[in-house]
Amino acid sequence: MTAFILRRLVQSVLVMLVVALISFALFRFVGDPVASLMGQEATAADRDALRARLGLDQPFWMQFIDYIGRVLRGDFGISYRLQQPVAELILQRLPATLELALVSGIAAFVLGVALGVYTALNRRGWLSNAIMTVSLIGVSLPTFLIGVLLIWVFAVELQWLPSFGRGEVVQIGGWRTGFLTESGRVALILPAITLGLYQLTLIMRLVRAEMLEVLRTDYIKFARARGLSNRAIHFGHALKNTLVPVITITGLQLGSIIAFAIITETVFQWPGVGAFFINAVRFVDVPVMAAYLMLIALIFVVINLIVDLLYYVVDPRLRVDRGAARH
Amino acid sequence: MSEPLLSVRDLVVEFPTRRGTLRALDRVSFDIAEGEVLGMVGESGAGKSITGSAIIGLIDRPGRIAGGEIRLRGERIDNIPEDRMRSIRGRRIGMVFQDPLTSLNPLYTVAEQLIETIRTHLGLSEREARERAVALLDQVGIPAARRRIDDYPHHFSGGMRQRVVIALALAAEPELVIADEPTTALDVSVQAQIIDVLRDICADRGAAVMLITHDMGVIAETADRVAVLYAGRVAEIGPVRDVIQAAEHPYTAGLMGSIPTLTQTAERLTQIPGAMPRLDAIPQGCAFNPRCPQVMPRCRTERPDLLARGQGRQVACWLHAREGVGDV
Ligand SMILES: Nc1ncnc2c1ncn2[C@@H]1O[C@H](COP(=O)(O)OP(=O)(O)OP(=O)(O)O)[C@@H](O)[C@H]1O
Ligand SMILES: [Mg+2]
C-alpha cells in the first residue's frame, strides 16, 4: 500500500515537472516579458537592466530551476495587465470556480448514478426511454449553447433566475463564498446546470451500461438463486460493482469540470479563474496563463491520486494480499 | 413410492426469437424423491441448465415456461408470485453453479455473503448467523474457517471457492440442491473432493440433489438415478446401475458404451455419429432418429412418449413401446 502511494506520488511529481517546464517555456518564449512590462518608450538600457533584474540573461536551465523555486514558494510573478501578484489574483477567484465545480460535480454524480441505475433497472419503461433520449441531447449540445438556451428560457423569458454574476458573497477568511446568501445560491443554479449537464449524461450512460453488464453476471444470478431481495441485489451487490469503474471516470470528470468551467464562466460572467484565464489570453497576460496551466494540472494530478486511492479502498482485489490465492 | 419431493411434469420452456419460437425443453417429466441424488446427463445444449433454471424460476428473459408444471412437495411452484418464489429460492431449493470463480461477489467477504443469505431466510441475529456461517464453512471442509471467513473470494483457490459456494447454497438448509456442473471449472484433482463434499453434506442433511454433469463417471459414483436428456426431451430415466449396465434408449447406449474413466467428458465420449440438432431444426418424430442405429419408419413421424418400464425405469423409444416392433 505505501509502496503504491509512493509510486503514484513520484509519478505525480514528474507530471507536474513536465507541466512546469511547458508553462515556463510559455512564460519565457511567448511574447517578450520585458516589452510587455515596459511599454514602447523605454530605452535599450532600461530594457537590459530589467532583463538582468528578472534573471532573463541567465541560461535556460538556471532560469527554469529559479522558476520552480519561485513557484514552490507560491510566486507566479506579476500580472502584466493588473500589475498584481498572479497568485493573489488567482486565489481571489478560485473559490468561485471551486464552488461552481463542486456543486455541478456532486449534482452530476448523484443524479447520474440515480438515473443510470433507474434506467438500467427499468430498461423497457417509457420513462427510461424518455430519459435516454433527453440524455442524447445533453451529450451532443455544446456547453455554451446549453448556457445560452438556459439564460434565454429562465432568465430572459421566465425571469426566474439571474443570468450573470455570483449574487451576494460573504467573505470568510480568504474564501469568498456564495453559499450563504439567497442570491448567491440562486445565481449558482443555471451555471451549475450548464457545467454539469454533460457530465451528468455521461455518468448516467456509463452507470446504466455498467449496471446492465453487472446484472448479467453469475454472482448476481447466484444471489437471486439464494433468494436475496431485489433491494439487496440491486443496491447492494450490483450497485457496488457498478461503481468500481464509474469512480475513475467520474473523478476525471471532476477535473474536466474545473477545466471546462472556462466556457460556462464566460457565458455567465462568473468571476472565477476560468473567466480570468480567458481575459488573460485576450491580453497575452503570460504569467497568468502559465499559472493557470499549472493550477489545472495540479488539480488533475491530485484528483487522479485520490481516485486511485479510492479505487483501492473500494476494490479488495487491488489491496495488498496476505499472499495470493491459498489452498 | 410416497409423494416425490420434486415433480416435473410435461415442462415446456420456450425462447421467443425474431425467427420464431425455440423450444428448449419439450415436455420434460421426472421426479426427485426425498434425499435422492438424481443425475442429469446429456450433450451440450440438451437443456440441462434450463431445467435447473426453470425449477428455481430464473430462466433468462425472454425465455419462459410455456407449459407443464413443477411441484415441490405437491405444491405448484412454477406459477407463483415472485416474492413467494423468492422465499423458496435458497430456503427450500439451493443452487450451485458451474463456475466458482464467478459465482461469488468479488467485493464482499465470504462472511458478508453467508450472513446475508442466512439472515434473509432464517430469523437469526448477526452474531448467530456468523456462528452458523463458520460452522457451515467448517462442514464443507474449509480449514481454519473462523479465520478465513472474513477473507474476500479472491483469497481462496478454485476448489475452496466452490466449497464456499456449496456452503452458500446450503446456508438455509434447503430440501433440494440443484448442482449445475459444479466441478467442470475445477482441476481434475479437486473435482472428486468437491463432489464428495456435496454428496456427504447433502446426505447428512437429507437434502436431495439434482446433479447436472457431463461426466458419467461422476453420475455412476454419486447418483441414485439418472435422467438422460436429448434435444430438450427426456430419453431415459432409471436407477444408475441399471441404466449403465443395460441402457434401453439407443442414445443412452451410445453414451454409456464409453464410460471408461472418471475424467472424460461426454463430448469426447459420444461415439454416436452426427450431432444433436439445433433447437430450430429438431426433426419430426423422435429427435434422435437421424443418428439412431436402430431407427424405424415410425421414429421419423411419431414422437415416442416417456413410458414406464418397471423397476423405476422409463424410456422414450419406439423399440420399447408396448405395441412396438417386438425385439424388446
Ligand atoms: N437465453 C437463451 N436464448 C435462446 N436460447 C437459449 C437461451 N438459453 C439457452 N438457450 C438454448 O437452450 C438450449 C439448452 O440450453 P442449456 O443451457 O440448458 O444446455 P445444457 O444442457 O445446460 O448445455 P451445457 O452442457 O453446454 O451446459 C440450448 O440449445 C440453448 O441454445
Ligand atoms: Mg449447462
Image (cartoon, rainbow, N blue to C red):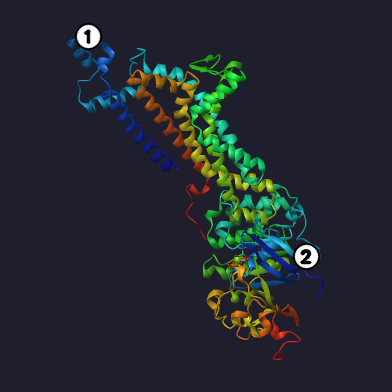
Instruction: Give the residue pinned by disc 1.
Output: A42
In the image, residue B265 lies at what x, y percent? 55, 74
Residue at horizontal 55%, vertical 81%? B271
**Which mark identifies residue B71?**
2
Question: Label 1 amino acid?
Answer: Ala
> Which structural element holds mark 2?
strand
Give the alpha-carbon distance from disc 2 to disc 1, as whole Å.
100 Å
Q: In which quadrant will I find the C terminus of chain B? A: bottom right
Q: In which quadrant will I find the N terminus of chain B? A: bottom right
Residue at horizontal 47%, vertical 36%? A252
Nearest to the observer: residue A41 or residue B209:
A41
Which of the chains bears the disc numbered 1? A
Question: Label 2 amino acid?
Answer: Arg
In the image, residue A6 lies at what x, y percent? 40, 39
One can see residue B135 in this view: yes
Residue A41 occupies which quadrant of the picture? top left
Residue B86 occupies which quadrant of the picture? bottom right
> Which structural element holds mark 1?
loop
Instruction: Determine crowd level at label 2: few under 14, some 14-19, many 20+ residues with C-alpha closer than 10 A.
Output: some
Image quarter for ligand 2? bottom right
